[in-house]
Image (cartoon, grey):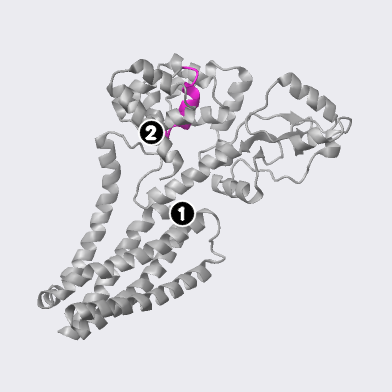
Amino acid sequence: MPEKAQDNQQQLHRLTAAIDSGAMARVRTMLNGLHPAEIAHLLESLPGKERLLVWELVDSDYEGDVLSHVNDEARSGLLQRMPVQQLIAATESMDADDMADILQNLPRTVIREVLQSMGEQDRQRLETMMSYPDGSAGGLMSTDTITVRPDVTLDVVLRYLRMRGELPQATDRLIVVNHDDIYLGVLSLADLLTHSPHLMVGDVMTKDVDSILPDAAIASVAALFEHRDLISAPVIDGSGKLLGRITIDDVVDVIREEGEHSLLGLSGLDEEADMFAPVGVSVQRRGVWLGINLVTALLASWVIGQFEATIEKVVALAVLMPIVASMGGIAGTQTLVLMIRGIAVGQIGMANASKIVRNELAVGAVNGLLWALVVAVVTGLWFQDIYISIIIAVAIGMNLIVAAFAGAIIPLLLRKIGADPALGGGVMLTTVTDVVGFMIFLGLATLVLL
């Protein structure tokens, strides 16, 4: 188990032990000695009643930071029980981008009161960020930036920074703009500190740094940060005017969420879902996918039913059927996961789709031949029937090829029609491998053995 996971479990154990013993003073002391992200993790790990009890013990100075770290569903439950004045106080210490994420999930009356409590400049910045949709660079950016002009000296910039007394989080460079806030380039802190203070900003700044448009997808933003090893990047509108910046801490959150989405989406789950959501909510959420899976299972059962007479006469077929479905399912899932990951990180698109499909077909064919031989030998020794051995070998070989093709083509088709490959791919793949596998296996058995 990773060390961080062990630390989290130990913290959770100490916290629950203190709660069970009624030592609320010890719980308060323990909580407020942790980082806000660790407090958020503990809150997500507690059931509803205990979560609310612990939340009441969190220091008010930490509430905003904690809210920015908990997942959407857990945060919604906490926000619903916070008085408006407490919520306003919590948002005062939050970064504008985190505040925008939180406010979008609140009633309009509460949003209005929070905005009215802010200064004019902060309110305008927040409203600008909230105007961009989730999943866009504009919704991810922060307006907390430091800008400088190209026609001032580095000495002036240094004196300005000393006067400010602090820098926004993840500031590795200052953004250079003209008097109309048109983006010109960046001035890294390293250049600011290592060059002569008498030089002009325009002589030292870097002009070829990529900027990001506000409607860019956050997946492309994450890819840009990954490929260019960025810590921050400016966001500009179509006319080149500076809107804000995106920082690496926000991008890390995006990458983590994308990874969780790809994993959980295969089961029809949401990465922001609360583990301790009410039973009714969880039943409703999961019931949809269980219903879809039932339909696909009934289809597979119907196919089996068409060969009922064959199975009654050759009982060994019923014993071997799960092997055909299982091998096809595993092989297809391997390809499916690779494809979903490749699409998510931009490595797979229509330009190379045909090549990757051909490659996966080749892998499926080789695996099909190899494991068909293995299963044929095992089946022959088990049932002492050469015909059954040949039938299952052919069925597994063909099903692994079909599984590889389906695992590669299904995500591409879903992406082409605008659907999420991570959500629908698993169910569709299972249907294909089960139905095709059973049809081939039982169909061959009917032709050969009857």
Disc assigned to residue 125? none
Q: Nearer the viewer, residue 88 or 368?
A: 368
Position of residue 241 measured from the top left corner of the image (x, y, whole percent): 71, 36
Disc sitting over residue 10 in the figure: 2
Query: Is residue 386 visible in this depiction of the protein?
Result: yes
The label nearer to you, 1 versus 2, is: 2
- Does 84 lie within the magenta span? no
What amino acid does circle 1 point to?
Answer: Gly
In-image side of 148 versus 253 (left or right): right
Kindly indicate the quadrant of the structure image that contains residue 440: bottom left
Q: Nearer the viewer, residue 204 or 145?
A: 204
| Mark 1 or mark 2: whose residue is earlier in sequence | 2
Task: Please name the amino acid that badge 2 sits on.
Answer: Gln
- Quadrant of the snapshot with the C terminus: bottom left
Residue 108 image-quadrant placement:
top left
Asked if the residue at tag 2 contacts the one at tag 1, i.e. Cβ–Cβ closer than 8 Å, the answer is: no
Q: Residue at x 56, y 27 (%)?
A: 95
In terms of secondary structure, where does tag 1 sit? loop
Magenta highlight range: 60-73
Provide residue 126's location: percent of width, then percent of height: 57, 27
In the orientation shown, which residue stands out farthest toward the right?
Answer: 198
Confirm whether the magenta stretch covers residue 70: yes
Tell me: 390 left or right of 406: left
Splitting the image into 4 quarters, where does residue 153 fall?
top right
- Callout 2 environment at 10 Å: few (<14), some (14 to 19), or many (20+)? few
Q: Which residue is at a point 37% across and 20% down the rendered structure image?
A: 27
Judging depth in this view, the residue of 31 and 249 nearest the camera is 31
Can you say whether 108 is above or below 8 in the image?
above
Q: What residue is shown at x 83% (from left), y 38% (from top)? A: 204
Query: What residue did someone put label 1 on?
Result: 418
Residue 264 % position (x, y): 38, 48
